Structure formats: structure tokens, C-alpha cells
Image (cartoon, rainbow, N blue to C red):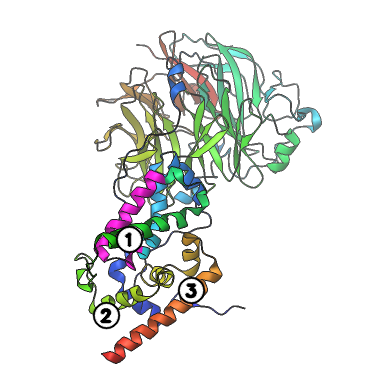
Amino acid sequence: MTEHNPLFDGGADPELDAFATMFEPLAENPELGALPRRAARLSVAWMAAAAAVLLLAGAAVVVVGRGGGPAGSAASGQPPGAGAAGGHLGGEGGGDGRVPGTGPGGADRVPEGLSSLRTGPGTGDEAGQTGTARSSTEVGSATSQRAHQLAVTHEGNVHYPQMSPDGSQIAYEVNYPAEKRTEVWLVGHEGGRLTGSPVRVEPESMNRDLLYRYGRGKNITHMFGWAPGGSKRKYAYTVNNAEGHQQIYIDGWSGFISDGVSKEPRWDPLSPRFVFTSNRTGNGDLYMWDDGAEMQLTFDELHAEIYPSWAPAGDKVAFVRAGKGESQVMVLDVNAYSSVPLVNFSGKDSTRPSFSPRGDKVAFLSNKSTDSVMKFGLWVVDATPGSSPRNIGPNIRVPSKGAPSWTPDGRGVIAVIDDREKRDPIAIFPIDGGPPRILKTGTVNNRDPRLVVVDGQWRVVFTSQGAESQGAKSWYGLFVYDVPH
Amino acid sequence: MAPRRPVSIRSSASSVASLVGAAKRGNESAFATLHHRYCGMVHATLLVRVGVGDADDLAQDTFVTAWQRIGDLRDEEAFGGWIQSIARRKAASLLRSRRPTVHLPGTLAAPRRLTAEATEALEALRSLPPHLAEPLAMRLIKGMSGPEIAATTGLTHGSVRVTLHRAMKRLREILEVSDDRA
């Protein structure tokens, strides 16, 4: 055994401590001064090529249905994930304590290398199989005054609906509380109606057997993100594996992003690249995936960088820098590789930033002015460092994934009011103040609203436990609501 | 016990190569992390050569030069040795430009006031050969452990261990002689 040597190993020693005391005025290192500007080497030439493609361009909506089962706890509002840094990466999956979700025998298995999309059974003919999508019966009309639901039924709760950029598909997550697992599904859509049966999204390169084995029976796919229209790759999503790692799979790409917990793919709205979060270096940092190449964007060793959200011009990314006791909203210039604080509420959590359609403002949630650290208000700040944030709504339900959604005109932010008595209504909050406009959807326990434009019509895609008269015993389903204006 | 500056050399931290690679692409955040990791080593390297005020200035100059020329660094893992050589050249250049001026202990920069005892100890450190003085300054002034010195300079653990031992022995001898004279 080697004898402890304080001179080499460090640690307390009277003689060395005396020197340390003596040299204390020299111990502090000089600060790094301003660096001279250098040209960024990232090619951004192709960014202009897709300039006409706007995020969530004209989309219509579909609703995924309800079964008879109770809503799971996972659906009742997830924690915002804005607390201590240690919990930011790795915890967000399809649910807690997931149990095996194996289907009945080999019928549910996909040979290796088969398509990345699994077609759902449509009619529920795989008896006993969980995660199946049943009928495609439409309930209600896309033009009705109230929200309507299209009954593509899952025996689980639907979350986090996202319309494809061309409006032809909707991606959504289904959480099965009994089995504590989550899947991503896609369903076709046209003119407010479903087209075809839903299909399950799974890794193309991973045998379903392996998926279960690696996931210890936990079939966890989640955090889906659409690529911009016209891209070679259509989407990316996150898969959990056995070691507790999360990997990102990309449509049509044989590889996948591994190394620790890598998740939250968020595509540049104008270019076929995305940022994602990973803890591969011991903490959460932001990385860029650009057609197979990966590069690290943030290098903060004291905080976790999470919840990235692109500016519409593809030049900036808002994100959350989370540390112990507080989380702040930052903005990263992806061409200059520099990030600056946008919101700095000391000792408070600010999270889920979202750029406005013109890129001049950022909406976010914060517990700065609420009476509990678990309650969040809605805030807006100019996307210029040093601007003063404005609180435009109290007590907001934190979305299961993602961030608050802007109205297409950039004048309002849509969010769910956390109000049990009023059954969590959806409202549009004007950014210049004034009372929120409550949307009369006729539904209860609403979640994850996103506002898209379909032929000039503002249409809200969201999840809910159904009509007011039906109570709250249904699965969360997918709904749409056309905003009168 | 005197406070020690935290030195961030973690096995789980971003690799030097990835930081250098990102810095080459213009990532200021990555370069700031490199500065955080290597500034103690660079500053100590300068402190055993020039006055305290000059060491502060040259440390900044060193990192500015490194930022401007990092594209020339082929072996990205060798960043520590590379930036230390920049610092040594900066110090040598400054000393050449000031000849025949003799460095006086009293020229220590005002913001970092040292006691007479510390000034004497620093002069004793400077009287050591640079290859002994540098790692010992990192240990005594910056509070870096042997493994941290090895990680930032590129020296082996064995080399650092032996060098620290020899340097400390020489420093004690010099200071004891000084005490005897006093």
C-alpha cells in the first residue's frame, strides 16, 4: 500500500497549509478577458434554402380517443423538471416503475431491419395486446363550436401531440399507467379526419425482442420531434435502454445517438439538424446533430442545460440552465457558440422557454411569483438580454413535454390554467396584459395544447379527459378545437 | 487551513480534445472551460518567471494567443503543454524586452499584496530551476494536487511526484539558509 504523500496527493499538511496561507493573494486566477472575434466555421449556407418552410405550417387535426379506464397518475401533470440538476437527465420517460409490456407472443415482434413504423392493428384483433389502436371513428366535427375527438382508442393516456410540418400526420405519446411504459404513435390526417390506422414508431435497427430485453420489458419511446418540411429525415425520437440510458433514433438513419442519456431532439425549423441534451460528460449539455456529425454546444460543468427551443430563424436556441436551487432561461447563438442569460430570477425556477413566431420574444414558465415552488406562472420576455420579463398568467399547468405554444400572430400564448374547480381550462394569454381568453372547448382536465393554422383557421390540438358531462374517468384522448376569431 | 481554489479536473468532464475541437470551431464557451481548467497552471508558470502584475497580464495574453492560434494545434490532447509553452515564450519575451532592468520584489502588483514572508518565499521559488519551480508553484500557490498538475501539464504522475519532492527539498534548503542569515 502506498503511503499517503500530501505533497503529491493533496490534503491537509501543516507545512503546505502554511504556504497556501502565505500565497493566498496569488491563488486566484486572472479572469478570461474578452476574446477577439473569430469567424464561425459552421456552414449555414443551406439554412436559407428552406427559409420558406415555417414551423408547424398549416396543419389540421385529429383526435385520438378514449377508452373506459381511469387516467393514470402520469397524465395528471408531470413535474416541470426545473429543480436540482441531478434529476434533469434520465428521469423523463414514459412513467415510473415501468413493467413489462410484452405482447402476446411473437405476433408483436418485428424482424430486425423491418420498417421503423409499425402499423397498429386498427381493429384491436390482437387480443390482450396493450398499446393497440382500435377504431378510427370520428366523433364530432372539426367545425363544431366545441372540441371534438376522433376515436382512435388506446388503452392508455395520450400526451404531447405534435402536428407534422405538412399537416399530414400527428405524432403523439401514449402512456400506459398499468404497465408504466410509453410509446410514440403516428396517425395520418387530412382535413380534420384521420387517414389510415395509427402506426407505432420503433427503432428500425433494433429488434423488438432486443428493445424489450434492453429495456427490461419497458418499451419506452418518447420525446418525438418532427424535422422541418422537405427534410430527408422526417423525425427523431428518444428510446430508453436497460442501463437507464436514453438514445435518440433518427428516421432513415442507421445509427443512433448513444452515450449516456441523450434525448429531447429539437429540430432546427429551417434546416435538417437538431439540438439535443446529453449527460455524456457528466452533466446535461446541449449538442447538435447535423447529418451524422455531433458537436457539443455548451460546456457548463456546474449546471445542466435542458429544454432547448429554436428561434424561427434557426439562429438561436433558448434553453434552461438548471442548477441546485434555481433554473434560468438562457439563449444560445448557435453560430457564435455563445450563450447569455435571458431570465435570471435568483433562487427561482424558470423553465420551458418557447420563441415567438417572429423570434423577438420568449415565453416561459416560472415559479417566481407563485406561492409554491411547484406552481408556475406564464411569463414573456423580449429575446434581448437585459429585458424585463412580464408575468402574463398565474398558475399554469406545466406541459407534459415541451413548452407553451404561441398564437400564430405572436400576440398571445396558449396554456392550461391550473384550476381544479374550473377543470383546467385552456386559455390564450395576451402578451400585452389583459385577461386571458378562456377557450370554450367543453372538455375537462386539458393538457398540452398547441395552436396550429389550418387554411387560415386557428386550431388547437390538445389532450383531455373528455366532455364536461363525462367526468374525469376516461383516458386522456386527443382533441381539436377551432378557435373562433 | 487556508482556502483552496477549486481545480476542475474531473474524469467525467468534457475531454480536452472535445473542448479544443469545439474551440477550434469558434465555441467561446468551450474555450472558457479550457481557461477554467488551465489558467491555474498557466498563471503559476508565469508567476515563477515574472512579477505578479505581469503574470496577470501575460496569463490573459496567453489565452488570447491560444484562442487565435488554436486552429494550429494538431494534437488536441496536447493542449496543456501547448499553452504552457505559449506562456513561457510570453514571459521570456517580456524579460528580454526589459533588459537590463532587474526584477525587484517590490514591484509586485498592488492588488495582490503579499506579506514579506510570502514575497521571500516567492523569490525562493523563482530561484529554483523552472522545471522544478513550475510544478511546485502549482502545488503551493494554486493548491493543485499532483494528479491535477500531471493532467494539465501532460507530465506523468511519477515525474510530477519526483519533481515536487525535489523542488520542495530545494525550497526548504533555500528558506532555511535565508532564516539562518536573518
Task: Judge by depth and name the residue closer to the eye, A255 or A429.
Answer: A255
Q: Say whether residue A344 is left or right of residue A309.
A: left
From mark 2 to mark 3, how far is it between C-alphas? Answer: 24 Å
Q: Position of residue B142 (x, y in %)?
A: 37, 67
Look at 28% across and 78% down and name the residue there. B120
Mark 1 sits on what residue? B91
Mark 3 sits on what residue? B163
SS assignment at label 2: helix
Mark 3 is on which residue type? Thr
Q: Which residues are magenta?
A: B46-69
**Crowd rating for badge 2 (residues with CA inside 10 Å; few <14, some 14–19, many 20+):** few
Quarter where residue A109 is shown? top right
Mark 2 sits on what residue? B117
On the same chain, marks 1 and 2? The answer is yes
Q: Is residue B55 magenta?
A: yes
- Earlier sequence position, callout 2 versus callout 3: 2
| Chain under disc 1 | B
- Earlier sequence position, callout 1 versus callout 2: 1
- Answer yes or no: do the residues labelled 2 and 3 have beta carbons within 8 Å? no
From mark 1 to mark 2, how far is it between C-alphas? Answer: 24 Å
- Answer yes or no: do the residues labelled 1 and 3 have beta carbons within 8 Å? no
- Earlier sequence position, callout 1 versus callout 3: 1
**Crowd rating for badge 1 (residues with CA inside 10 Å; few <14, some 14–19, many 20+):** many
Look at 44% across and 23% down and name the residue there. A45
Mark 2 is on which residue type? Glu
**Crowd rating for badge 3 (residues with CA inside 10 Å; few <14, some 14–19, many 20+):** many
Quarter where residue A381 is shown? top left
